[in-house]
Image: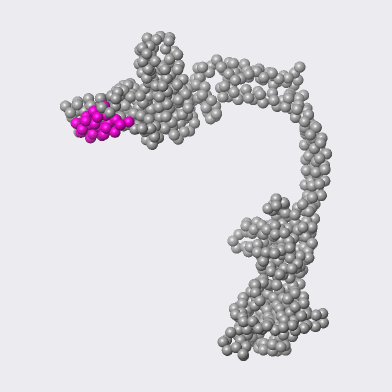
Amino acid sequence: MRIGVRLALTSFVLVTIIVTAVIVNALWWRAAQGNSRQLAATINDRIVEAVEAEIQDIATQGRSAYWAIRTLFQNQVLTIDERDKQQFVFLSQIQAQPSVSWIVLGRPSGDFFGVHKQGDDKLEVMEIDVFEDRYDDARTRIVDRYYVYPSDILFREREPIPSDFVSTDQPWYKSSIDRTGPHWIDVVEHPTGTRPALVFAGPVIVHARTRGVLAVMIEHDRLSRFLSGLSVGESGAAFILKPDGTPIAVPDPEADELMGTRFDIEPELLRIAQAGIYQAMEPMDETATRMKGQEEFRIIGDDRQAYGVTLTPLAYSGWTLATVIPESEFLAEIERTTQRLLLGILSLVIIAAGVSAWLARRMIASPLGAVAGELDHIERFELDRVVYRPSRLSELDHLSGTIHRMAGGLAAFRKYLPADLVRILVSEGIEAKPGGARRELTILFSDIEGFTGLSERLGEDVVPVLGSYLDMMSNAIQGERGTVDKFIGDAVMAFWGAPHDNPDHAADACRAALISARALADSDLRDDRGNPIGMRIGINTGEVLVGNIGSERRLNYTVIGDAVNIASRLEGASKVYGTSIIIGERTRELAGEAILVRRLDKVAVYGRDGGTTIYELVGLAGEPIPAWIAPYEDGLASYLWGDFDTAIRHFQKAQRLRPEGDRPSEILIARCEAYKLNRPKADWDGTTALGSK
């Protein structure tokens, strides 16, 4: 019993219900994911507030220490040369400001005086000068080291060290000596080595005279220790980076060497933060040096884990605060809940989907697929492969029966149609209506030698011989991407370059001609007298009109034009010259090095003005060159120059070298003998009329 398609479609309602459930679950998951990201944004805002407050506090401490000491200098409570007082004031200020690492004074002489905090329990007082006990003008760095106690400091040791440190060469000195007020800069070099620091520096001006540069330095490790104390989720981290991604501060509680690579945080997090910086800076124009506002990115790390990266520009020197938080910290619980929900839905889906899939496949998909396959066979004109596909669905059963009957009707006509050409036209989407276009194609004509007499002698027995020959030609032409146009008795017309575009149409036509000629020679096709059957081929290339030629009632996809006529004349010329394959001048030009030819003659084709050079196709590139070709072409050159005696000698040599003789040489020897008796006209260029076919 057959049922309708509409009844079968009801089985898919269950699938719709399942899809709806999945969509609802997906929307819930999306909302939960948005809430989690909002929580991450809130955490980031708090981190930004804390970092900005810390930077502001550090900057306040640096400015406070600077203005306190500079005020003492300006009011002459403290002078540039009172180093004992300077030491007392600098030590008191560096202990009063926990964030300050250095307080230094650079003099125009290049001398340096400063106090350096080493952690919470050590201090250094440092002076670099040319001292009186030195006679070589070399500088010495005198370092006094102290222990720090809650209520006192205790001298530990003094160490003199040779030094080439000159304060006037330092960036903080050079950028401040000519200013009227202080400013912030970044420095790296210190008397004790390389450590990046934030510096508040300005000139010391007493009585309108600049006496030196005072600088308060805050090393970046102070920020690193602060970042290490921030809580950025369970495994996230915060970084302060330069616009190029260079780290200013990383969450390292020790932070002994910021320029090093030892961090207590996972290095992958720093790479993720830098990747966010690169993405943020990439779309900026050439004049921009920093981001204009907060930006968020989702970046996949080398560990294939997703991270949320938030970049917030800070107020100082283009610095950016980057917070990196693994998405799994906020989405893990959501994902676990989602997985449990999906597991329940999946159990129902598997059962429902299995039933739905079975029904759909059994009753609709498989029958429709089979019917579609039969239509594909019809489209490709593979009519013998079309079969009837019975179905329980009445509509599909009726459709399959109709297709099978249609294939039977078309099969009766395929013997009269070039099925391969029809397949190509259908695949190319060429409509069956009159029309054409001018294109350069290669055309081939062939026929069997002496077919008229053979058909008269064999009568109806000539049909199998002709069928074998036409099969041989069709296989060779189609094997080399050619199109069989028509059979005219024993003649075959084919062309290359349409309907498929083929830039190698000339070479392909030549290969097809050689393949068919050699296949015929290797076959057992013989005439009624037992002689092997031969054939002649003419090939020419030129611009023709190709398309659906005919009327609205009957069309023929073919080519017409002068180049077609010439190809036919060249096939007829093969009989005159005793050759198998003759090709035209343009064919020779396009085929190029792919073929082996000999220049045959210069002829004027019947019905066409002007001479053209014709060639005999001998073989393909790479095959041995027959010895008789060279003397023949030498003879033809002498012939065209009018040196008929020399031409005769070359042609005779070609005849001797070719065991079966050479008909073209024989023809041209006769011409030379005639021209020796009656010289050609002065404007003769060697062209000979072929006459009618």
Query: As displayed, is residue 690 above or below residue 66?
Result: above
- The percent coordinates of residue 684 (x first, y second) are 23, 32
Quadrant of the image occupied by residue 264 = bottom right
Name the residue at 71% across, 58% down.
269
Name the residue at 53% across, 18% down.
414
* 651 in the magenta segment: yes
Left or right position of 416 against 228: left
- The percent coordinates of residue 202 (x first, y second) are 66, 79
* 319 in the magenta segment: no
Colour setup of the view: one colour
Quadrant of the image occupied by residue 541 = top left
Main SS of residues in magenta: helix
- The percent coordinates of residue 648 (x first, y second) are 22, 29
Quadrant into which the N terminus falls: top right
- The percent coordinates of residue 90 (x first, y second) are 73, 82
Name the residue at 61% across, 86% down.
130
Magenta range: 626-655
